[in-house]
Amino acid sequence: MIVVKVGGSLGIDYDAVCADIARLWRSGQKLVLVHGGSGETNRVAQALGHPPRFVTSPSGYTSRFTDRETLEIFEMVYCGKMNKGIVERLQRLNVNAVGLSGLDGRIFEGRHKGSVRVVENGKTLVLRGDHTGTVEKVNVGLIELLLNAGYLPVLSPPAASYEGVAINVDGDRAAAALAVALKAEALLLLSNVPGLLRDFPDEASLIRRIPAADVETYMEFAQDRMKKKVLGAAEAVAGGVGRVIFGDARAGEPVSAALAGAGTVVQ
Amino acid sequence: MIVVKVGGSLGIDYDAVCADIARLWRSGQKLVLVHGGSGETNRVAQALGHPPRFVTSPSGYTSRFTDRETLEIFEMVYCGKMNKGIVERLQRLNVNAVGLSGLDGRIFEGRHKGSVRVVENGKTLVLRGDHTGTVEKVNVGLIELLLNAGYLPVLSPPAASYEGVAINVDGDRAAAALAVALKAEALLLLSNVPGLLRDFPDEASLIRRIPAADVETYMEFAQDRMKKKVLGAAEAVAGGVGRVIFGDARAGEPVSAALAGAGTVVQ
């Protein structure tokens, strides 16, 4: 079993990712696909007159401030356009994909953080009305039901709070929690960079191998969105996932290449 | 087993529908929910600068012309905002709902009509690039898998073409095909009117009962969107569904009321 997370940034080749996944799936590889949608969410939010607002936590992580209107735009893009677009690509390749969010069957559950502490212009503020949280529980029953019946699950945030409210959660960390819960051999975090770069954005500075025990010390090289991937990788290896690979989803055979050792391998 | 279809027009009280469904579900009633999203799709399409285009077929049926961009907006609203909004309402009521489109597991399959004949200003034209079709096949395997495991399926267009391409299909007729495939006792088509009206929009002119054998003769009373409901009802009763009820989803307990005989009952 492997868990493949493909990001939502500009430059990702979803056709290439889906073609590669279809080949692997037909060869008998059990897998679950998790996807993002951040870039498209920003575009649609802007077009709808409700532009995205990103906030930085006191510990330096960036996230989307998700008021109710943003949550609905987020659902439109992640669960509508992105999820069904990926399911359609896979169905066209004769893979019987089933697209679900973390709300469906409460696949991803966690605590709803109604307010968030953020740093703006050097000051710490508390913003209320946030619909975010962190995946604390993965209900694998539905995933296993689908896999055992021959369906390929395609998953996306949001998650469900313990009260059943939709919450925006980080997709990389959700994929990490899923990989742990499914006892996956590998977690692939694919995005629009070749892996973790020692000297961002110089792609020649790719870090090839990270010993699992040292992953947190590599946080210093992670910029912006890569921070949550490193955090997710640390959580996955701590939870028993054999290897985590930061791979490139811009072209070629992104999943096969990562499994063959391209990108940054945490092991 | 009953199939409940709730429309997507202005005035529908989704909180009331979900609360009623949660009560029935907890009392042991097996059911599948199908929903629309037409009103909200129009609003979002307008806001995104790609306003809806409705066309009328030579036989007088109105439908949405669905180019690729419209299809993606359609998916955003139906599969994203509407579907996850309904799943969230049910999850908050402790009903373990799972939201899916007809693409997922190819639940709804049909032929892709790439072009459509339309009448405009008295002339018949052929429009190309349409992503529409009609549900010809319902793959109940995934629905039954979910129901048997205790999940309430919440379904929405689009469907999958036989080639796996997303196609916009009429939700009422999809629900009718589903009710036939599941051998449902009843199909409820709930919208923002009390039922079929002899003298639209006079609600006092509600037609209370229609003998199943005569349903097509009542087509003359159907306006606009009600035409496809009458067509769906005819298809459902011809396929062995015991009764079809056109009910009111604007308030109260819409599902229970329809089951108790309110609205227009085709039997």
Image (spheres, coloured by chain):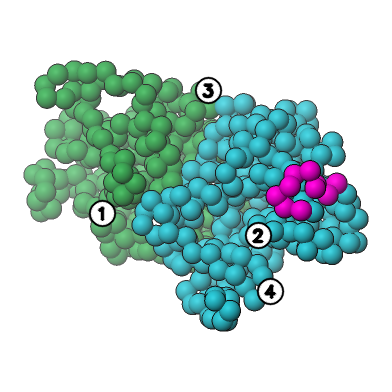
Chain colours: A cyan, B green
Q: Which secondary structure, mark 1? A: loop
**Which portion, as a residue range, is magenta?**
A199-208
Say which residue label 4 marks. Answer: A59
Please name the residue that numbered disc 3 is placed on. Answer: B163
Q: Quarter-wise, where is residue A13 in the image?
A: top right
Compared across the picture, whether A217 is left or right of B17 comes to: right
Chain at tag 4: A
> Observer-nearest residue: B23 or B8?
B8
- What chain is tagged by disc 1? B
Would you name the residue on which mark 1 appears? B10
Secondary structure state at the residue bearing disc 3: loop
Q: Quadrant of the C terminus of chain B?
A: top left
B148, A202: nearer the viewer:
A202
> How would you rate the neighbour count of disc 1 (Cα within 10 Å): few for under 14, some for 14-19, many for 20 or more?
few
**Dot in front, 1 or 2:** 2
Residue drawn at (48%, 43%), measured in percent from left and top? A81
**Mark in front: 3 vs 4:** 4
Numbered badge on residue A224: 2
Callout 2 amino acid? Asp
Do the residues at pointers 2 and 3 share their chain?
no
The residue that appears at 43% across and 59% down in the rendered structure is: A51
Magenta stretch holds residue B71: no
Q: Kindly report the distance in space between the C-alpha atoms of the residues bearing marks 3 and 4.
A: 49 Å
Give percent across and percent down for residue B224: 19, 38
Can residue A34 be seen from the camera position used here?
yes
